[in-house]
Amino acid sequence: MLPAANRLTRSQDFGLVVRRGRRAGRPRLVLHALMPGVQDSGDLGARPGTSAQPTLDQSKVGFVVSKAVGNSVVRHRVSRKLRHLVRDRLAGLPPGSSLVVRALAPAAEASSAELGDDLDAALRRLLR
């Protein structure tokens, strides 16, 4: 299980990470990451009361597994695999970073090892 302190739960935070964060795509998943201290030139048009960064102190992770992946049983299986894989990699994320992991349709047939390889490759690309 992913600790509650490391879960991305607010819809606004998901949207912010996807809109303003960096993206790395792999065959089975797409990662969106918003790192602390990275300023975006789009901040000038922000609505009053919204911040450029989510209100987070620790690294937080959220998951998006849509119906394109499969039925409810398949989606939950993919979510559990991804949660387990990300939990082991939380220490490698910069403090205060936000990560959204979006599963693509091929993730339904992927093993944990294949998802882990895609996750590692995408994280390496985002963190360089």
Image (cartoon, rainbow, N blue to C red):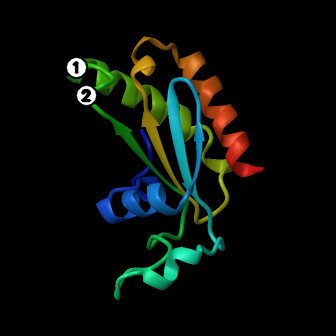
In the image, farthest residue toward the bottom: 48
Q: Residue at x 51, y 13 (%)?
A: 111
Q: Is residue 67 above or below residue 36?
A: above
How many residues crowd mark 2 within 10 Å: few (<14), some (14–19), many (20+)? few
The one nearer the camera, 95 or 48, is 48
The one nearer the camera, 59 or 115, is 115
Q: Which residue is mark 1?
A: 71
Q: Residue at x 44, y 49 (%)?
A: 3
Residue 119 locus on image (x, y percent): 60, 32
Query: SS class of the residue under badge 2?
Result: loop
Query: SS class of the residue under badge 1?
Result: loop
Q: Which residue is mark 2?
A: 67
Q: Residue at x 50, y 31 (%)?
A: 29
Would residue 14 appear left or right of 94 to someone viewing this image?
left
Image quarter where the N terminus lies is: top left
Would residue 103 appear left or right of 49 to someone viewing this image?
right
In the image, farthest residue toward the left: 72
- Name the kind of residue labelled 1 in the image: Asn
Tag 1 near tag 2, CB within 8 Å: yes
Q: Disc 1 to disc 2, how far (Cα)?
A: 6 Å
- Name the kind of residue labelled 2 in the image: Lys
Q: Residue at x 44, y 73 (%)?
A: 55
> Hey, which quadrant is residue 51 in on the image?
bottom left
How many residues crowd mark 1 within 10 Å: few (<14), some (14–19), many (20+)? few
Would residue 11 appear left or right of 45 to someone viewing this image?
left
